[in-house]
Amino acid sequence: MGIVLGIESSCDETAAALVTTDRRIVAQRIASQDAEHAPFGGVVPEIAARAHADRLAPMVEAVMREGGLELHELDAIAATAGPGLIGGVMVGLVTAKALAMAGEVPLIAVNHLEGHALSPRLADPSLAFPYALLLVSGGHCQILRVEGLGRYRRLATTIDDALGEAFDKTAKILGLGFPGGPAVERLAREGDPRAVPLPRPLVGSGEPHFSFAGLKSAVLRARESGRYRDADIAASFQQAALDCVVDRLALALDAMEPVPALVVAGGVAANRAIRGALEELAEGRGLRFVAPPPALCTDNAAMIAWAGCERIGQSDPLDIAARPRWPL
Ligand code: KG4
Ligand code: ZN
């Protein structure tokens, strides 16, 4: 059995976790920066980097103390090395490098998207490769065929906004504050999903890609018309987004070599309505449906530590660079 320290700092969550190769989350700490960024309606990179720099070291100290471990007892230190806001990624990666050096422990530079992509395997020991993955977060919206560790075949991506971004922008239009996804979901429960006619961009098109910019503009027009209740706009938006996801995913599943399971990961996977629709889609096709618990869907360090567990035995050089862009 091995144990890995994971560090996450690519966006606005500062997090550290200890995870074992037999899938036990021994200790974890997470601090959201929502309060710092809320006045600006979105994540401010400079503020994020400073907050990571202030909080990360004490968090690492706390999980190590809770786990009762010294640095040299770790099997690896895994940190997000991209993609993400570069200042924040650098804080996490440099911290991991220093700890790796001090403890003489291997460093594993983790692709944040791989962290999301493998997180369902931390939650569900029986989930084997290959699987179809819908990866939906604030910055990414992709359909992948996960064929093995490091083997990700991308079938679809977004041509403009990511799904989480569309939720965040809708929240902003409705004055729901930041971050928007959970607030839109809450308000949508009180609304009628058929009340507002909204477009389903790219639905029915022959490639399984996504587009959400037109949907966002339609939400803005609906709000400005003054004809609809906010709850109805939220519910109709969520329904339109969900219809797009189901249509695009169905097309991608038809196009890929068959898989036994459909998996959803990333922050938007915390959305219950979307989870429900995906579960139905999977059931209709005789696929197993796997969704990690919501706390493992949004950014966290346990998924980064787990990606390190999957890669145990490997190591990256101490001069490895942080990458703002890093496609899977
Ligand atoms: O994976 P994540 O924590 O960070 C990124 O890597 O982007 O995803 C954050 C995104 C945000 O856009 C947030 O609004 C969205 O996930 N999100 C949700 C929900 N919870 C988080 N979107 C819809 N419904 C939710 N319940
Ligand atoms: Zn993420």
Image (cartoon, rainbow, N blue to C red):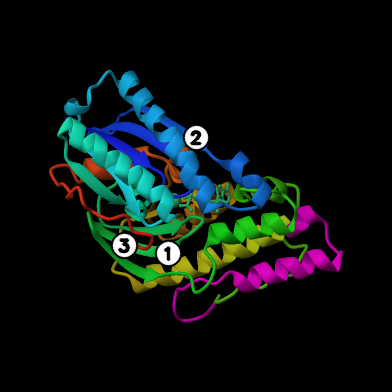
Query: From mark 2 to mark 3, how far is it between C-alphas?
Result: 26 Å
Residue 133 can be seen in this image: yes
Q: Which residue is mark 2?
A: 31
Give the residue type at disc 1. Gln
The tag on residue 328 is 3
Left or right of 100: which side holds 303?
Answer: right
Please tell me whether residue 124 belongs to the stretch shown in magenta.
Answer: no
Nearer to us: label 2 or label 3: 2
Residue shown at the point (41%, 37%) measured from the top left: 15
Mark 3 or 1: in front is: 3
For label 3, the SS is loop
Q: Residues within 10 Å of mark 1 (few under 14, many from 20)?
A: many
Marks 3 and 1: CB-CB under 8 Å? yes
* Left or right, 206 with reference to 202: left
Image coordinates for residue 24, horizontal then vertical, percent: 30, 29
| Residue occupied by mark 1 | 142
Q: Residue at x 49, y 49 (%)?
A: 267
Q: What secondary structure is found at the residue carrying circle 2?
A: strand
- Image quadrant holding the C terminus, namely bottom left
Residue lying at the far bottom in this picture: please name it: 206
Residue 75, how many percent across, how many down?
17, 34
Residue placed farthest to the right in the image?
227
258 and 233: which one is in front?
233
Quick one: label 3, few (<14), some, or many (20+) residues within 10 Å?
some
- Judge left or right: residue 235 versus residue 118: right
Residue 109, percent from left and from top: 26, 49
Residue type highlighted by circle 3: Leu
Residue 200 visible within the image: no
Q: Quadrant of residue 193?
A: bottom right
Q: Which residues are magenta?
A: 204-233
